[in-house]
Image: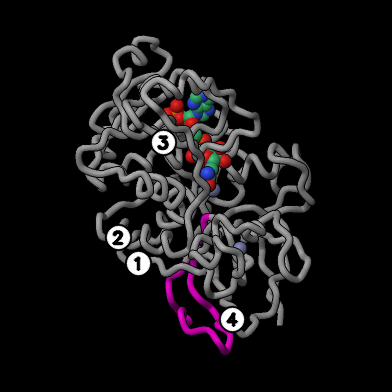
Amino acid sequence: MTTTARAYAATSPTAPLVPTTVERRAVGANDVLIDIAYAGVCHSDIHTVRGEWGPIAYPQVVGHEIVGTVAEVGSNVTRHRVGDRVGVGCMVNSCRECVNCLAGMENYCLKVSTGTYASVDRDGTVTQGGYSTSIVVVEDFVLSVPESIPYEAAAPLLCAGITTYSPLSHWNAGPGKKVAVVGMGGLGHLAVKIAHAMGADVTVLSQTLGKQDDGLRFGADRYYVTSDASTFETLANEFDLIVNTVSAPVDLQQYLSLLRLDGTMVNVGAPAEPLPISVFGLMGNRRSYAASGIGSIAETQEMLDFCAENAIAPEIELIDAAQINEAYERVLKSDVRYRFVIDTATI
Ligand code: NAP
Ligand code: ZN
Ligand code: ZN
């Protein structure tokens, strides 16, 4: 039996999101039906519904930071039980046979993993995301959310958390390493908390000093404003790792100049526009420039457990579903402290 879920959907790149319903597939043998409690609002949701990453089919429900409780499980499900607190992030399936999937890196599936929204599912339908009251997901792509993480704040970990944890872990943020985080929004504020918990020396590079107290409270050791040219002189050749979370294009050469010998700048921010790069900016100090996309399912579970152990929780503004369009405008103005989360009971 299918489930009718209440949801908020975009109907065009420019129209406000509106209430609607979506039909969730009947629970298959390997599926989990989740009653969604909270859904985070990621900047990727905005890029997607506004067509900035390419055309999509409408109506489209977005949202890939999902937490809720298991309402029903299929007959083969072993990892989750009815009543468990669970989460779903940016992907709901992958090919399971390519070299990257077999290596446990489904986020880099060579056939492209199935996105939680705006992706073609195995049955040919377009996936509909988490701004919704329920969802059906195959059990392997459902995460266990530790109960010690506050329920209403946990959702942003499923995208913003793993997207920053993965590069920080891959490039060995830790004691003795200097890490800079560019942009302190949804991803950025979690990058600060996670890098600090990993033991790194953390610097925030923000457009504004308005969030300095917060940045230091989240664990940053230093905080600089990027509109001041002297910041780039003061911090030249300083960092082992720069994590760029900015949703818009930035002047890469400026930031690359802050990397020390063999330092790496990794983009997790995903502006639609190409970012020009100078080979000479990389050659000095043998610098590297990289990009990173979310994280695997195993790494997402590792991140959730790490956050539970280190008492890391996102800073959120809980909103009613009807406030979603206003929330989008505030995200676009960098006026988010630091992640909007929809209480799905209000959908
Ligand atoms: P967000 O909450 O809007 O944060 C972005 C931050 O970047 C802002 O708070 C602001 O911080 C800074 N910023 C915004 N516009 C800027 C501009 N024009 N120039 C300089 N700085 C600017 O967004 P988010 O949800 O964290 O997402 C950030 C980006 O990551 C988006 O592009 C999103 O699509 C992408 N993303 C990628 C992945 C992945 O797998 N790679 C996963 C999730 C999200 P300050 O005010 O502190 O400067
Ligand atoms: Zn996201
Ligand atoms: Zn694959």
Q: Which residue is mark 3?
A: 243
Q: Secondary structure at mark 3?
A: strand
**Callout 2 crowding tier (Cα within 10 Å): few <14, some 14–19, many ≥20:** some
What residue is drawn where x is 30% and y is 58%?
Answer: 306
Question: On the picture, is 73 further left or further right than 117?
Answer: left
Q: Give percent across and percent down for residue 13.
A: 75, 40
The mark lying in front, picked from 3 and 2, is 3
First in sequence: mark 4 vs mark 2: 4
The reply to whether the C-beta atoms of the residues labelled 3 and 2 are less than 8 Å apart is: no
Mark number displayed over residue 308: 2
Question: On the picture, is 181 further left or further right than 160?
Answer: left
Give the total of numbered labels: 4
Q: In which quadrant will I find the N terminus?
A: bottom right
**Callout 4 crowding tier (Cα within 10 Å): few <14, some 14–19, many ≥20:** some
First in sequence: mark 2 vs mark 1: 1
First in sequence: mark 3 vs mark 4: 4
Q: Give percent across and percent down for residue 69.
A: 48, 72
What residue is drawn where x is 30% and y is 43%?
Answer: 173
State the residue in front, 71 or 43: 43
Mark number displayed over residue 30: 4
Q: Is residue 166 above or below residue 95?
A: above
Q: CA distance from mark 4 to mark 2?
A: 27 Å
Q: Secondary structure at mark 4?
A: loop
Q: Secondary structure at mark 1?
A: loop
First in sequence: mark 3 vs mark 2: 3
Q: Which residue is mark 1?
A: 146
Q: Give percent across and percent down for residue 70.
A: 50, 76
Magenta residue span: 65-86
First in sequence: mark 1 vs mark 4: 4
